[in-house]
């Protein structure tokens, strides 16, 4: 089955830029989505289809994909950005189709 | 607004069964695929199952295949997950999750608050 690999943690100072990566085989041909989950809350979509932001998400959040790696970039990081972030794709495998999540990255500010 | 309200969680012994439900509102339920996603305490998100908008297509994670049945009632805007032969490792918060629509490659749009299942003797 398809696997997405994320670093367990990323630490950044307030005001700096955070980059969270998500690796997967031939990821550039898939649509990658990112979710933010603050402690005690349900996840929220922050980036969809590699690089698009829902209207409610600040433009400090951006996404990109190159080769086998998707990257979520958060500019001018704020304390309120501290959360777990998950990448996600749909696995079109004929025998094992389904939703695939990365293991999650804890962003510490 | 879109709402997904899960229910049915609780404490159950290993080997027993449990049925989770999800009541949807604020959107045209019959037009969207719905998923169940779970999360163990302090752990990451794990997809459990998906049902297509019309209920014809159902997909299951290997970890629950053969032990879970996902179904929906579009006339009542409800979703259910019947779980059998529960294991300790099924202990988690279970989220009912609305798909954006269209292809399964599209993102998950909205999450419920979840219902907690604890499997313990």
Image: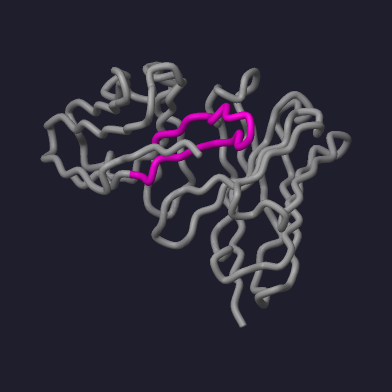
Q: Is residue A85 left or right of residue B57?
A: left
Residue range highlighted in magenta: A87-104
Is A63 included in the stretch rendered in magenta? no
- Image coordinates of residue B15 in percent, x first then y, are 70, 73
Q: Is residue A108 left or right of residue B100?
A: left
Question: How many numbered callouts?
Answer: 0
Q: Quadrant of residue A104?
A: top left
Task: Decide: is A46 above or below B88.
Answer: above
Q: Is residue A11 left or right of residue B14?
A: left
Q: Quadrant of residue A73?
A: top left
Residue at 72 percent of width and 54 percent of height: B66
- Residue most extreme to the bottom: B121
Task: Decide: is B31 above or below A20.
Answer: above
Q: Nearer the viewer, residue A9 or A97?
A: A97
- Image coordinates of residue B9 in percent, x first then y, are 66, 63
- Image coordinates of residue A19 in percent, x first then y, are 21, 31
Q: How is the image coloured?
A: one colour
Is A96 included in the stretch rendered in magenta? yes
Residue at 53 percent of width and 29 percent of height: A90
Residue at 16 percent of width and 44 percent of height: A11
Residue at 66 percent of width and 75 percent of height: B14
- Residue most extreme to the right: B75
Task: Decide: is A61 above or below B81.
Answer: above
Q: Give the quarter of the figure containing the C terminus of chain A.
A: top left
């Amino acid at each position: 089955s398809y696997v997405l690999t994320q670093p367990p943690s990323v630490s950044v100072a307030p005001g700096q830029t955070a980059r969270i990566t998500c690796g997967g085989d031939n990821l550039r041909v898939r649509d990658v989505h990112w979710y933010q989950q603050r402690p005690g809350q349900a996840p929220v979509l922050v980036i969809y289809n590699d690089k698009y932001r829902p209207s409610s998400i600040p433009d400090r959040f951006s996404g990109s994909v190159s080769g086998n790696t998707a990257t979520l970039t958060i500019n001018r990081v704020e304390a309120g950005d501290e959360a777990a972030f998950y990448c996600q794709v749909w696995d079109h495998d004929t025998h094992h189709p389904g939703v695939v999540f990365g293991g999650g990255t804890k962003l510490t500010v | 607004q879109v709402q997904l309200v899960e229910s049915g969680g609780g404490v159950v012994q290993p080997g027993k069964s449990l049925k989770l439900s999800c009541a949807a509102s604020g959107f045209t339920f019959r037009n969207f695929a719905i998923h169940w996603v779970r999360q163990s305490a302090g752990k990451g998100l794990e997809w459990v199952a998906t049902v297509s908008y019309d209920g014809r297509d159902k997909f299951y994670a290997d970890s629950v295949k053969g032990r879970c049945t996902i179904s929906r009632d579009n006339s009542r805007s409800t979703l259910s997950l019947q779980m059998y032969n529960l294991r300790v490792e099924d202990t988690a918060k279970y989220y009912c999750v609305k798909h954006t629509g269209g292809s399964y490659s599209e993102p998950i749009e909205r999450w419920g608050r979840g219902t907690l299942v604890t499997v313990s003797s």
